[in-house]
Amino acid sequence: MPSYTVTVATGSQWFAGTDDYIYLSLLGSAGCSEKHLLDKPFYNDFERGAVDSYDVTVDEELGEIQLVKIEKRKYWLHDDWYLKYITLKTPHGDYIEFPCYRWITGDGEVVLRDGRAKLARDDQIHILKQHRRKELETRQKQYRWMEWSPGFPLSIDAKCHKDLPRDIQFDSEKGVDFVLNYSKAMENLFINRFMHMFQSSWNDFADFEKIFVKISNTISERVMNHWQEDLMFGYQFLNGCNPVLIRRCTELPEKFPVTTEMVECSLERQLSLEQEVQQGNIFIVDFELLDGIDANKTDPCTLQFLAAPICLLYKNLANKIVPIAIQLSQIPGDENPIFLPSDAKYDWLLAKIWVRSSDFHVHQTITHLLRTHLVSEVFGIAMYRQLPAVHPIFKLLVAHVRYTIAINTKAREQLICECGLFDKANATGGGGHVQMVQRAMKDLTYASLCFPEAIKARGMESKEDIPYYFYRDDGLLVWEAIRMFTAEVVGIYYESDQVVEEDPELQDFVNDVYVYGMRGRKSSGFPKSVKSREQLSEYLTVVIFTASAQHAAVNFGQYDWCSWIPNAPPTMRAPPPTAKGVVTIEQIVDTLPDRGRSCWHLGAVWALSQFQENELFLGMYPEEHFIEKPVKAAIARFRKNLEAIVSVIAERNKKKQLPYYYLSPDRIPNSVAI
């Protein structure tokens, strides 16, 4: 009688093992086996991290094994089980791998195909076509689109984390409980003692050190010591938390009437302002998005304010970027003066603080939340709905959406919801953040997610002109490494453009992103379909880069750049000044966040800057969804390219007082998970 050796691997995460009964059936081209109980006498099967083997004898030859069916039945109480993979040694000595990497819950079952990636056109056998179709039908019932707020990209239909499909939940909810994490952060930072003085002001800038110095690091200390300097202010637009707003100024806007006379003392080339613009030495950051956004009114005891400044910057003879003019609202006038470096010290300092505060709001809500978290969730939901596990693009992308839907669901549950944590410290809380996302959707385009195009669109591509833009330099290296990798994988499974165009599941995935994620907006430039291998490779690069590198660049520097409160105030408690020569240091301190909001802010940026436990970094694919040698070779080359980039960045950073490491691949998590 033919005998198969079945090897079963259980996951190593908490509670992955099970005491339930596990049954296995084999479905082959020549017949199906009976249901076999996998059980060894006097042995605890399916423990966490275990790899167990069983001999399964069948009555007659089954032919080529097409499917393996695993069923879990209750032993005592329902006991979820995480199945990594099954391997099968056939009576003829062949090995077949069946990747799973899924939870089986309740009296559940899972039907697995072997690990070879297949397009829909490759399946000619009815049972495999049926399996493919049934998997997608089941997933489409589990992964439903929902509008969390009008104008937002659609998200998962789940009110809270425990409503999500088990496969995409965090292993431990405690790890992503924002309330718990922020409270723990404040405990670790020894700042809880200030909370009873919630609404009282600090005494002076030095007073902020009371909540700062406990876990200071190289960059945050440097920010604390140099935050008032124009060089540090300008540097952050290139390499701080939000390096995506600065653009080359090709024409001075009418709403910002800066003249040569105003900024003459800042210009170093004996040229007029217009000539400096023509030579490409002038840059601009415009926070127009914040104009008219409602400031936080959730605390009746504290007035909070927002501004929509415009900042003009100059590339000096040392090729460093420095600010030369700031207007604190969009409409010029006598009560909206243009602040200059030549003004009184505290006038200029307060103007810069307003810009830094506005930058913080745009960073948190648009650059970080909308353009990495929410966009990556769209890709993730569309992938689960339209690509079966056997599809090569599913196998490629699944590592890059790990925990993304879960972290976003947690954020909607605790962070950005009404009366959530966002309201505690941020001037855009209480609904302003929602208005911002609704406005920013018009600028969320496919081209703006293509890293090289986005850099060019802002006129920031020249390394000779702007030599210290490390975000650009490192980002281009990582983008190209990902693009080469995706092109290789696409080339393995799609031998021509026609095969791409005729893949119905792939086209449904791309269309889902356009219709639901981008709400069918033509102006978004998101493709409704992909028609060539090159276009598909670029699309996959956008998905992976957004979830990994772009998120890393704008997330993990939050403690570095925002922990010194005056450098990134989450709220301002007085309106912008309407005249020059009246600002005092006491006014500035009274305008900055009070003690309580400073503590909440510090806890938040510390918690958000931490890596997940057991973080998986770019190029790490411990779940072997692919079994084919050509793809494994492509992954190995990808890793090698990433290691070379790590070396390049490390070598450059050796010579830097302010190292830039957020886009070093060994610090880029695979997915948006924090």
Image: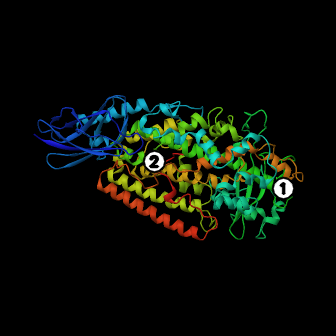
- Residue identifier under label 2: 400
**Could you say which is closer to the camera, residue 441 or residue 568?**
568
**Could you say which is closer to the camera, residue 338 or residue 45?**
45
Q: Which mark is residue 54?
A: none
Residue plotted at (77% across, 69% down): 268
Looking at the rendered structure, the number of numbered marks drawn on it comes to 2
Residue 307 appears in view: no
Give the position of the N terminus as an image quadrant.
top left
| Image position, residue 474 (x, y; %) | 54, 61
Q: Give amino acid for label 2.
A: His
Residue plotted at (87% across, 47% down): 334
Q: Give amino acid for label 1.
A: Tyr
Residue plotted at (57% across, 45% down): 371
Residue plotted at (62% across, 60% down): 460
Q: Which mark is residue 346?
A: 1
In the picture, measured across the screen, residue 147 lies left or right of residue 66, that is right
